Image (cartoon, rainbow, N blue to C red):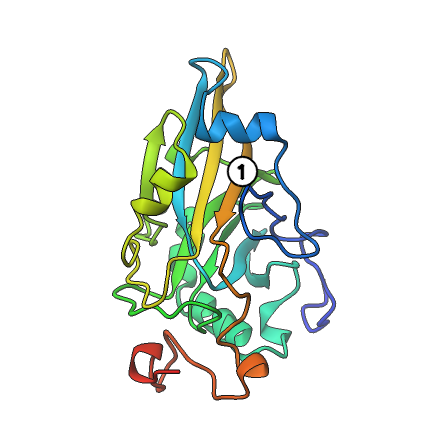
Amino acid sequence: MNLSDPELRPLGRKAYGSIPHLPGSRTGPADRHLPPALARVCTERVRDARDHVVVLEKLDGSCVAAARVGDTLLALGREGRLAAHSPNEARRLWAGWVAAHSERFMAVLKPGEWLVGEWLALAHSTRYALTHEPFVAFDLMSQGLSLPWAQVTERLRVADFVTPGLIHEGGPLDIEAAMSRLLPHGFHHAMDPVEGAVWRLERREEGTGVRVDFLAKYVRRDKVDGGLLPENTGRPALWNWRPEAPSSKDVLP
């Protein structure tokens, strides 16, 4: 494997796919909605007692991953390419952060697995007055599939990784209730309106344990993608976290 190749995708695929939207969520041109019947399972009525709903705060940063390929740890962007070769400064900072915390990642990951999360170093549309490290892990992929949330949190506990704020767990939860529980600043000290929430629908199957059936998300209608990025504002980047640099809470737009 030529790790100097900027086009290399070590996983042979994207590190993470696109999550479909619930009804009423703000979407972009490439986004898609969850079928209405499945949306109702998340927000109104589960199919039966084997369905289990987990609702987490949706964070506004860059989706990234740390993958274990054999005994090598690789920092990746969502598209699956090596973050160290990215033209994006925040992605390169992610690569450096993974290297600095390699022992923690290796304590969690088995060969062939990758940890996915939100890299909050650079403010995209939401500033955070972070009281924790800039990486928030929200999924653990094994054999290309998401592990159930209980397994994710158990596996991450050994390395003390931060996870998204838990809004709800159990039966369905409607969008209005989920968003109301994120007022005013969410679980991660957002300085701007919280972006939204993610629903994980898990299902218990006899003899095979729990599997993740699907994920869905809601993004508030007035959210502007990349509204704080310098290429959109013409102003300096705002950083929630960066070595030897002011954070977003010190530089107001």
Q: Quadrant of residue 28?
A: bottom right
| Near-viewer residue (138 or 251) | 251
Q: Quadrant of residue 72?
A: bottom right
Q: Position of residue 201 (x, y in %)?
A: 49, 30
> Above or below — where is 13 with respect to 253?
above
Look at 72% across and 52% down and name the residue there.
12
What kind of residue is marked 1?
Answer: Leu
The answer to whether 236 appears left or right of 19 in the picture is left
Look at 32% across and 48% down and name the residue there.
165
> Above or below — where is 72 with respect to 250?
above
| Near-viewer residue (136 or 160) | 136
Residue 164 seen from this side: yes
Look at 34% across and 39% down and name the residue there.
177
Q: Position of residue 41 (x, y in %)?
A: 50, 25
Q: Position of residue 54 (x, y in %)?
A: 40, 34
Pointer 1 local density, CA inside 10 Å: few below 14, some 14–19, many at least 20: many
Q: How many marks?
A: 1
Residue 157 seen from this side: no
Q: In what element is the residue under mark 1? A: strand
Residue ID for mark 1:
215
Q: Position of residue 221 (x, y in %)?
A: 50, 55
- The quadrant of the rendering that contains the N terminus is bottom right
- The quadrant of the rendering that contains the C terminus is bottom left
